[in-house]
Image (tube, helix red, strand yellow):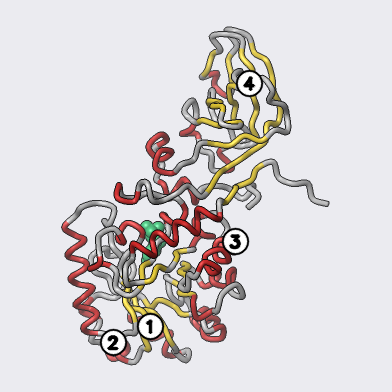
Amino acid sequence: MTPKPPLRLHLDTDALVHNWRALDALSGKARAGAAVKADAYGLGAPRVVKALAAAGCRDFFVAYAGEAAQIDGLVDPAQISVLHGPLTADEARFMQARGIRPTINSIEQAQCWLDTGGGACDLMVDTGMNRLGLALSDLGDDLVARLDVEVLLSHLASADEDSPLNAQQRARWIEARAMVPSRGCSLANSAGIVLGEGYHGTLTRPGLSLYGGVPRAELAGTIRQVAYPQATIIQAREVSAGDTIGYNATFTASRAMRIGVVALGYADGYLRCWSGKGMLRSNGTPLPVVGRVSMDMTLIDISAAPHIRAGDWVEADYALPEAAQACGLSQYELLTSLGRRFCR
Ligand SMILES: *Cc1c(COP(=O)(O)O)cnc(C)c1O
């Protein structure tokens, strides 16, 4: 029997489903899909996809063909779209064999998809981000006319801000829709959903807010925390006034203290920005991080929780908007950097 890891990433499935339903309702006449790329932002794509599919979500977006394979079998492959498209002819054949849709991002990808046999696909149009997608000026190409387009997509660069770019991108997306026939159309990520009905099309693509992220103030109060990093205490120890704690002795005890050594470090994505700033809890009692976070361990002041022993679980404060504010990482980075040692 393999010993269980001393770290777990608790997923509040009810909150996840609540968030999807709330975003689906905010999407009005459009239905909400789910961006589950990067292992559902680090939370574990299979369990996220199962929960959302059971709640009625029908559209799942991954970045790479290999990520589609990870959730193939949990939903109908026709419900999966691969955002980066076919990167090679082998990937195109893989998606054709399974019935997974690629998002076509360039004339080269359109050529590759048609040469390997074609089939239903999505089409990404660049409307001002200059990342992936065909330019409006490419849309008259014969190869584009030969594509069987399910959803015509574009992606907003600044949906989390009140930027004039939003309306500009929306206007170009509408222009593109008039040039390429498709069965559906999609523009909004989590933040874009809040910009209103004109941004919804037939399908929205939230990612971050499904998992507890609040990219715009309008979503505060609606979106619930989903991911809870938890770790065990490896050792509890006593220190005296004047003792220093951790690497580079950045913390000096001003009184006798009890210190808990937590099985959580920067190798787990609990980065050094939490040094002297992070907060863990035992049954709600706050236990502040003292000194530097190290690779596999973090030291916390457990003086306020004298009952704590080695083997007990503690939980890091990880409400995404507040955590991002406290440590300077983005809400996306806070999720996707959580390491492989967490039991998911
Ligand atoms: C990641 C991604 C999304 C989801 O964006 P969030 O900001 O996480 O809601 C939507 N569309 C595309 C093309 C993406 O790459």
Q: Is residue 142 left or right of residue 228?
A: left
Q: Mark 2 belongs to which amino acid? A: Pro
> Mark 4 or 3, which is nearer the eye?
3
Q: Is residue 103 above or below residue 28?
A: below
Looking at the rendered structure, the secondary structure element under dot 4 is strand
Distance from disc 3 to disc 2, alpha carbons, whole Å, reads 35 Å
Q: Is residue 158 left or right of residue 248?
A: left
Mark 4 residue crowding within 10 angstroms, few (<14) / some (14–19) / many (20+): many
- Return the x and y of residue 187 as percentages of the image width and height: 30, 68
Asked whether 328 or 198 is in front, the reply is: 198
Distance from disc 4 to disc 3, alpha carbons, whole Å, reads 35 Å
Distance from disc 1 to disc 3, alpha carbons, whole Å, reads 26 Å
Residue linked to disc 4: 259
Residue linked to disc 3: 47
Q: Mark 4 belongs to which amino acid? A: Ile
The reply to whether callout 4 and callout 3 are in contact (CB within 8 Å) is no
Distance from disc 1 to disc 2, alpha carbons, whole Å, reads 9 Å
Residue 162 is marked as: none
Q: Is residue 213 above or below residue 114?
A: above
Residue linked to disc 2: 181
User: Residue, x 65% and y 50% (percent of image)?
Assistant: 343
Asked whether 182 or 62 is in front, the reply is: 182
- Return the x and y of residue 166 as percentages of the image width and height: 21, 61
Residue linked to disc 1: 150
User: Residue, x 41% and y 82% (percent of image)?
Assistant: 121
Distance from disc 4 to disc 2, alpha carbons, whole Å, reads 64 Å
Sequence-wise first label, 1 or 3: 3
